[in-house]
Amino acid sequence: MSQTVFAPWNDPDETPLIRFKGVTKRFGGFTAIDDLTLDIYAREFFALLGPSGCGKTTLMRMLAGFENATEGTIELSGQNIAPIPPNKRAVNMMFQSYALFPHLSVWENIAFGLKRESTDKEAISARVEEMLRLTRLTKFAKRKPHQISGGQRQRVALARSLAKAPKLLLLDEPLGALDKKLREETQFELMDIQEKTGTTFVIVTHDQEEAMTVASRVAVMDEGRLVQVDTPDVIYEAPNSVYVADFIGDVNIIEGHATPEGERARIDWAEGQPPIWGTPRGAAGTGSGAGKVAFAIRPEKVAIAKEKPEGRRNLLEGQVIDIAYLGNSSTYHVKIADGRIFKAQTANTRRLVNRDITWEDRVWLSFTETAGVILEG
Amino acid sequence: MKRFSWFNATSLTLGFAFLYLPMIILVIYSFNESKLVTVWAGFSTKWYGELFRDQEFLDAAWVTLQVAVFSSTIATVLGTMAATVLVRAGRFAGRTLFSGMIYAPLVMPEVITGLSLLLLFIGIGLDRGIFTIVLAHTTFAMCYVSVVVSSRLTSFDQALEEAALDLGCTPFQAFRLVTLPIIAPAVISGWLLAFTLSLDDLVIASFTTGPSATTLPIKIFSAVRLGVSPEINALSTLMIGIVTIGVITASLISKRAAVAQARDERAAARTA
Amino acid sequence: MRKAFLIAVPYLWLLLLFLVPFLIVLKISLSDIALAIPPYTPTLDVSAGWQGIREFFAALDFENYVFLTTDDLYWKAYLSSLQIAGVSTLITLAVGYPIAYAMARAAPEWRPTLLMLVILPFWTSFLIRVYSWMGILSSEGVLNQLLMGLGLISEPLQILSTNIAVYIGIVYTYLPFMILPIYAALEKMDESLLEAAEDLGCSRLSAFWLVTVPLSKSGIIAGCFLVFIPAIGEFVIPSLLGGSNTLMIGKVLWEEFFSNRDWPVASAVAIILLLILIVPIVLFQRNEQKAREAEG
């Protein structure tokens, strides 16, 4: 396998930077992390994604040293980190609230960690200046945290946690406090800085778009377990469960009964309706394509037309009941034969006035046999 | 603003007149020439002179000041520790008793606190004097300090301490370099509160002192039991004056800080 | 280890200087009357082991408490303390509520100043504030001079050394404790609630009764307890402003101790005072708890 693509998780010779081995964390009677095993490799930008309370923050706090695992071990570079207190770990964290010290200036905030391990004033000063340049904060060095904007604070927090050149940087919802536009800009800045410094980043987020944008791999979590760990495109195109399919992006889900027929599988989903043809996940995943299944298809992979398209096996007839105009695209809500709502999304390549499909229209929905995934019901 | 009627204006005027007139009258009469405090016989500062020539008052003031400085300082240390325990230590054996002992002195009648401490000092054969008053004042003042400091600690973002640990601080360094500077205003107001309570206390000091140490409140109390005295008026005026200047200065400083903060935040929002 | 130290220091301090003294009071209240000569029998002889402890408890009795019921001075003092504290609490509420209300309705830029003006007296000596009324209320005092000067009365009124003076003293010194919690409750209140009530047909007065008062209830309750609880055990006010017939338990305890030098009875008086205080303190705590839950 050529090494042009960064994919250490596919390389059996690569040793991971972090290994979770059968880690369980309980708070009293509540299990926050349930027997979790996971490897994260050096230089990865790894995203932990899930709804609040799924255990992603607990996982991160165990890496930082603020929580200890109830069972199992966590290794950093092959060493068990349980007995190492947070102040001795080569791990730094960027806090969700940024946790900037309000009584210290930007410069002193960034220097704070450096001063703990060294007394060499010049070295500290040089490193702080470097961090200020990296995060474009040089002219704010003397300001106090309350004298700068939210986006600048975010960058101070990043600079402070990077200053000690940790092996691993943890980012807890780093962009959560920023507005949408700034967040998108900052995502690219984060990726850029990660690449420049070569630090391993583990980011916690509940924002799936953010995880998809920045991460080399995404771990989708639910109730203390890992549901799927994969690259963003696999997570999106080939989710391994209804939970993942539903959590990431918009999806149409149809439950039915699958029967394999050659390379394809036939899904019977409603009395008197033509079946849907799909491709079992086979090589990509675990789906056998038989028995009770859920068929999942993204709205943008569903074509919508007023005329019945020729030569397609997957065809559904219905009536447009709602149109959500999103500017660059429109999502059509189509009521199909059994009263179910099916969503189809098309790019608005033409102006709105020229749109030919409107409310109440009878339309045909179609998609290819490889467009959707068959998930275990 | 439209609801601020004449009724509200009247309540405020009468209310503040009630709160301040007695003290204003006291201040005015402290400048009365006459020994008969109720008859105005012209302006004079002679009672201030008398006061400063009265060695007993000066001694009592010195005792009071020593007691207040020592007890409020020890109480601030202990109270801050207690507040940290209450807010941060989580569960430990005897926690309920601990928080009970923090809150109980706040509602305990002074006569009972005084009586019980006196019985303890007699029981263990401790000579009563400045030292025992300091012990007594420290005990009840530390509870006030811990209430003030713990209310600040509760709103303190614990991530700040975690960030300090994450950046390589030991827990003690994290407290000294991060927590303490941030909660300093609360610790200072705790100290001021403890100091004022100590300066002010008559009942507990009366129980726990011995013949060697008379505090100012004890001295004032024994003087005014017999009736109004012009020297006490002068002393009261001085005390009211010091407190007024202190409180107004403190509130101006904090107001200026708040204004500066608001201005900075607006400026930061603009540069965003 | 560090945590243990942090807990141990204030813990031990409070055990030694709060709990132990309190247990001593309890023990002495159950001991025999012996004039001012410690130790009081029985003494706890731990070296005698279990037998010693048993004898110690067997010798304790409720003699002093029985004595308190036989002399009507004591129960009259308790009742009179409760009554004086109760009445002055109600007067303080009547005086304090309009002030708190007006403060909460004042322009926002004025509120910090008004708040400071309410808090300022709290920082000045309690003793001096009580004393300031002596010059006003005495028979040749400012008030009588003013009333006689206006021709409203021909003879000076006897106010000082009566219960009225005690009421005035309590209302005056504890007023900030009433104003602050009520102000805090009213200040949080959204003024559009009143507009909504009026929009729905309430008159100003009924909007006040149906909206403002219920929403400030927790502040009112807190204020009342903050005045009532310390007023019961008050000593300085009745001894400076009250007369010889003003009975308050704090004063009785003081005299029992300093004049009669009867420590066991003084201790018993203290224990009963505490038992009486438990009820309002528990109610107060519950109110605070409820207010906290409502907020958060």
Image (cartoon, grey):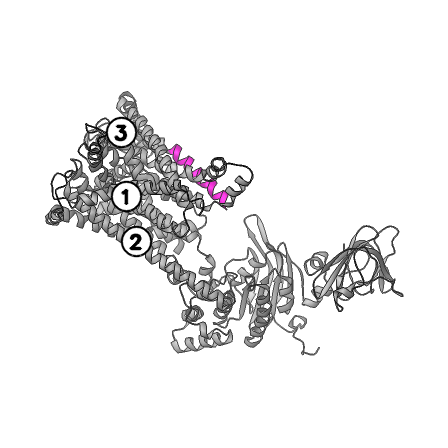
Q: Where is residue B151 in the image (x, y as percent from the top left)?
A: 41, 50
Q: Is residue C35 above or below residue A158?
A: above
Q: Give the range drawn in magenta.
A: C278-296
> Is C294 inside the magenta-drawn segment?
yes
Q: Check the residue under mark 3 and report the chain it is in.
A: C
Q: Position of residue A92 (x, y in %)?
A: 50, 67
Q: Residue C163 carries which label?
A: 3
Specify the subunit that label 2 lies on: B
Q: Mark 1 lies on which chain?
A: B
Q: Disc number at residue B248? A: 2
- Report, in whole angstroms, how far the alpha carbon at label 2 lies from the one at label 3: 35 Å
Amino acid type at mark 2: Ile
Classify the position of the N terminus of chain A by image quarter. bottom right
Q: Where is residue B138 in the image (x, y as percent from the top left)?
A: 28, 47
Compute the Cα span from label 1 to label 2. Answer: 15 Å
Q: What element carries label 2?
A: helix
| Residue A328 visible, this angle | yes
Q: Is the magenta stretch mostly helix, strand or loop?
A: helix
Up/down of B72 relative to B6, above or below: below
Q: Does the magenta stretch include residue C231?
A: no
Q: Is mark 1 on a helix, strand or loop?
A: helix
Residue that badge 1 annotates: B20
